[in-house]
Image (cartoon, coloured by chain):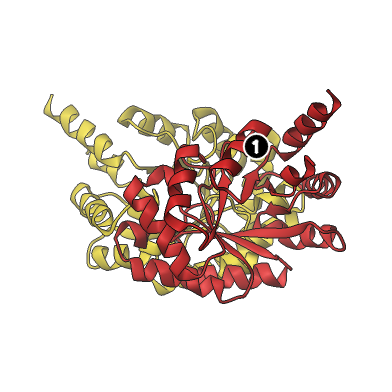
Chain colours: A red, B yellow
Amino acid sequence: MNKQYLKVIDHTLLKHDATDKDIENCCKEAVEFGFYSVIVQPYYTGLASKLLKGSDVLCGSVIGFPFGAETTDVKRFQAERALDNKAEELDMVICMPSFKNKNYADTENDIRQIVKFGVPVKVIIETSLLCEEEIITASKICINGGAAFVKTSTGYFGGGATAENIKLIKKTVGDKIKIKAAGGIRTIEDLITMLRCGADRIGTSGGVKIAQGLISLKEY
Amino acid sequence: MNKQYLKVIDHTLLKHDATDKDIENCCKEAVEFGFYSVIVQPYYTGLASKLLKGSDVLCGSVIGFPFGAETTDVKRFQAERALDNKAEELDMVICMPSFKNKNYADTENDIRQIVKFGVPVKVIIETSLLCEEEIITASKICINGGAAFVKTSTGYFGGGATAENIKLIKKTVGDKIKIKAAGGIRTIEDLITMLRCGADRIGTSGGVKIAQGLISLKEY
């Protein structure tokens, strides 16, 4: 029953010097190992969704990534285009400037404007830039904005997901919103730790190694 | 005549947890030290251009930053909004996916679509992700796309500007396009080295320290 662990993985390929061939490999791996989704840059969303068509692996794209410092109308336009390209989930970065200026109504509205498109939205709050109080506030804003998930990190700034932060978010949100742990998750042990602390989904570029770890565990 | 060194600086504040107050300080510094421009995230472009109005410091914004992995229509929308917010120069990231797939016509078109808006466009080729041959090819694409500058780096991926890369770009482009060195330029010595190798503009978040270095040089 190890496969349950693979079905929580968003198989993530965001390095911008990736080529069509890298995207093809990524999609093949996702189908082979039974990951939940593939997450790619906007440029590659059309290609990835085409490659995944007919499989049970979803295609996800990113919005306002990695800074979240776009204006809301730009994020809306990005979301429209991602949906044109058949993205089925969107990982957006919280509007960090409005959040840091404590304009929480604007931060919440920025999320709501993307949620309106009707696909599950994961809001990356970039925990490495936040203190505990801010993590709690940001998590509540994600709930109020109608997001499907609070997500910890882009993986591009400082630390990724930690057990402590996942626990803190879980304690804050309960069952009102799901949690995606991302950033620095490299092994099956990391993954299981995150799930035990309250994560529902795991974002990682290391899914294949994790899967191979699972397979070798089964062999012994 | 040291002030000539300060007038080549794009005073750059792109960290996304910056607040209104940080932007205000940044604009004040740029006016005080006589930098060429201030470069901020899209979210802050309206604020920065308002604060700089009436000064001789320009306001710049970023497009497709830092990945360049947006689709061209998204970059166009970003550029329109930046111009609505009175950006006077645009630093855009080359379409790295099309470039890495060797779809050079698409890469050039992506630039041309932004150049069409009529303000100077600096195209970041992210030298740390390119081999020498690719740096030469990318520089030529910038010329053909009508860009005002080839720019070395976002500062977010691997190394920034190096003397070798500036020399290579200069040798490639001659006087057909200007060169902006960015990434890791922290001292007046770095700045002068880049200018001597062929750079016309310097992007740095360390402009104030460089300026203060200049001032103390003058004192001795």
Residue A100's place in the image compared with A168, above or below, is below
Q: Position of residue A177 (x, y in %)?
A: 53, 61
Q: Quadrant of residue A48?
A: bottom right
Residue B167 lies left or right of residue A45; in this view the side is: left
- Residue pictured at 60% horizontal, 53% vertical: B68
Secondary element type, mark 1? loop
Residue B117's place in the image compared with B172, above or below, is below
Q: Position of residue A181 (x, y in %)?
A: 56, 46
Residue B24 lies left or right of residue A3; in this view the side is: left
Question: Label 1: which residue?
Answer: B130
Dot 1 falls on which chain?
B
Q: Quadrant of the C terminus of chain B?
A: top left
Q: Position of residue A201 (x, y in %)?
A: 63, 50
Q: Quadrant of the N terminus of chain B?
A: top left
Task: Please name whichever residue, B122 or A56, is drawn nearer the observer in this view of the structure.
Answer: A56
Residue kind at label 1, given as amino acid type:
Leu
Residue A46 lies left or right of residue A54; in this view the side is: left
Label 1 crowd bin: few (<14), some (14–19), many (20+), radius 10 Å: some
Q: Residue furthest left?
A: B219
Task: Please name whichever residue, B164 or B85, is drawn nearer the observer in this view of the structure.
Answer: B85
- Residue pictured at 63% horizontal, 46% vertical: A202
Residue B16's place in the image compared with B197, above or below, is below
Q: Quadrant of residue B64?
A: bottom right
Q: Position of residue A37 (x, y in %)?
A: 73, 54
Residue A160 visible in the displayed image: yes
Residue A71 visible in the displayed image: no
